Image (cartoon, rainbow, N blue to C red):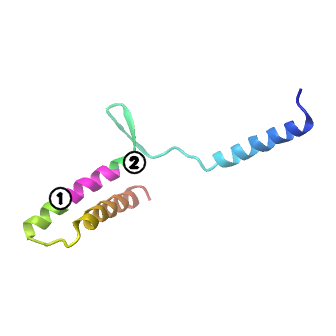
């Protein structure tokens, strides 16, 4: 048997659920071979490829990287976030 208090709690929970769903929208994604990939995944993959290209360029120019453990992940993050901002704002 449903009491008055349980009905109020149910209405409150449903209202909060609807409130939290109002900000939800369809996520940006790409259709690749029939499967949807999130846009951040594509941006991070391109960011890694750009970091590999930067590494190759650094080798060709004989640039010495003091801390490659910090430099290359930072470059990957920089390229990924820049692509995300440029393409999806």
- Residue 2's disc number: none
Using the image, determine if residue 36 lies above or below residue 81. above
* Residue 32 point in image, percent of width and height: 33, 36
Crowdedness near tag 2: few (<14), some (14–19) or many (≥20) residues, C-alpha within 10 Å: some
Q: Is residue 27 left or right of residue 86?
A: right
Q: Secondary structure at mark 2?
A: helix
- Could you tell me what secondary structure mostly forms the magenta stretch? helix
Quadrant containing the N terminus in the rendered view:
top right
- Residue situated in front as seen by the camera: 84 or 51: 51
Residue 48, magenta (yes or no):
yes
Residue at image location 80% in from the left, 38% down from the top: 10
Using the image, determine if residue 15 lies above or below residue 79. above
Q: Answer whether labels 1 and 2 touch (C-beta < 8 Å).
A: no
How far is disc 1 from disc 2 in space, using C-alphas? 21 Å
Residue at image location 75% in from the left, 44% down from the top: 15
Using the image, determine if residue 29 lies above or below residue 75. above
Residue at image location 37% in from the left, 61% down from the top: 81
Q: Is residue 54 left or right of residue 18?
A: left
Residue 7, magenta (yes or no):
no
Q: Which residue is mark 2?
A: 39
Quadrant containing the C terminus in the rendered view:
bottom left
What residue range appears in magenta? 43-53
Q: Which residue is mark 1?
A: 53
């Amino acid at each position: 048997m449903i009491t008055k208090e349980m009905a109020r709690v149910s209405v409150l929970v449903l209202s909060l659920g609807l409130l939290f769903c109002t900000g939800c929208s369809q996520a940006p994604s790409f259709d690749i071979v029939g499967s949807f990939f999130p846009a951040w995944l594509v941006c991070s993959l391109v960011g890694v490829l750009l970091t590999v290209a930067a590494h190759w360029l650094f080798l060709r120019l004989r640039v010495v990287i003091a801390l490659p453990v910090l430099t290359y992940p930072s470059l990957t993050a920089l390229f990924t976030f820049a692509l995300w901002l440029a393409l999806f704002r």
